[in-house]
């Protein structure tokens, strides 16, 4: 998937995304009426946003608890740098790993993992440790999500900057 570049978005893109936040089921026609923009323009922008990777898949909005995964943990992973490719493919094969980031600091990777409970987390951690190239892990269990992922403030900031220009 292409990586989204912030310069790809403009105020119309921001308005479309904010409108979708308010009504995720809105059609291109409904969005065009709400925003006062031609339906074809909205459709083209949505296609561009999805194609560029700026607008991600709908499933990323899913709460894992709705699937029975009530426990969330963050695993710091130390890896053998010569095995990075096998580590990546090994991590991709474990569906409970929902995000992985390459990081600086003591760990090489940070993995966001969901589990059905602590015994399930233990199983998943052992699966991760079996991957060729994983040297060690450190686990932090999330006890409460204080601030969910949010982007509306960034989008509103883009609108403000462009309105001043």
Image: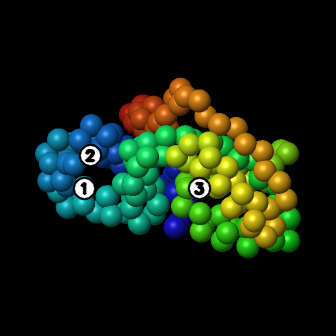
Q: Residues within 10 Å of mark 3 (few under 14, many from 20)?
A: many
Q: Indicate which disc residue 24 carries.
A: 2
Q: Position of residue 130 (x, y in %)?
A: 75, 65
Q: Is residue 102 visible?
A: no
At a point 31% along the width and 58% down the height, the residue shown is: 46
Secondary structure beneath label 2: loop
* Distance between mark 3 and mark 1 Cα atoms: 34 Å
Secondary structure beneath label 1: helix
Q: Residues within 10 Å of mark 2 (few under 14, many from 20)?
A: few
* The quadrant where residue 21 appears: top left
Q: Is residue 123 visible?
A: yes
- Count the numbered circles shown: 3
Image quadrant occupied by the C terminus? top left
Q: Nearer the viewer, mark 2 or mark 1?
A: 2
Q: Position of residue 45 (x, y in %)?
A: 32, 58
At a point 45% along the width and 63% down the height, the residue shown is: 52
Q: Indicate which disc residue 97 carries.
A: 3
Q: Nearer the viewer, mark 3 or mark 1?
A: 3
* Distance between mark 2 and mark 1 Cα atoms: 14 Å
Secondary structure beneath label 3: strand
Identify residue for label 1: 42
Sequence-first disc among 2 and 1: 2
Q: Indicate which disc residue 55 carries.
A: none
- In the rendered structure, the answer to whether residue 162 lies left or right of residue 127 reads left
* Distance between mark 3 and mark 2 Cα atoms: 26 Å
Q: Position of residue 96 (x, y in %)?
A: 55, 56
Q: Position of residue 39 (x, y in %)?
A: 17, 57
At a point 81% along the width and 67% down the height, the residue shown is: 133
């Amino acid at each position: 998937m292409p990586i989204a570049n912030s310069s790809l978005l403009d105020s119309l893109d921001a308005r479309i995304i904010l409108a979708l936040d308010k009504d995720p089921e809105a059609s291109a026609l409904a969005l065009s009426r709400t925003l006062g923009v031609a339906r074809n323009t909205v459709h083209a922008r949505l296609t561009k946003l999805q194609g560029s990777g700026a607008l991600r898949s709908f499933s990323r909005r899913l709460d894992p608890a709705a699937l029975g995964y009530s426990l969330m943990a963050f695993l710091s992973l130390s890896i053998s740098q010569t095995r990075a490719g096998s580590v990546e493919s090994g991590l991709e094969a474990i569906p409970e790993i929902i995000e992985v980031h390459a990081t600086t600091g003591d760990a090489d990777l940070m993995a966001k993992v969901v589990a059905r409970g602590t015994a399930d987390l233990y199983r998943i951690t052992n699966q991760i440790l079996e991957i060729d190239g994983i040297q060690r892990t450190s686990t932090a269990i999330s006890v409460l999500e204080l601030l969910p992922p949010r982007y509306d403030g960034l989008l509103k900031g883009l609108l403000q900057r462009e309105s001043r220009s």
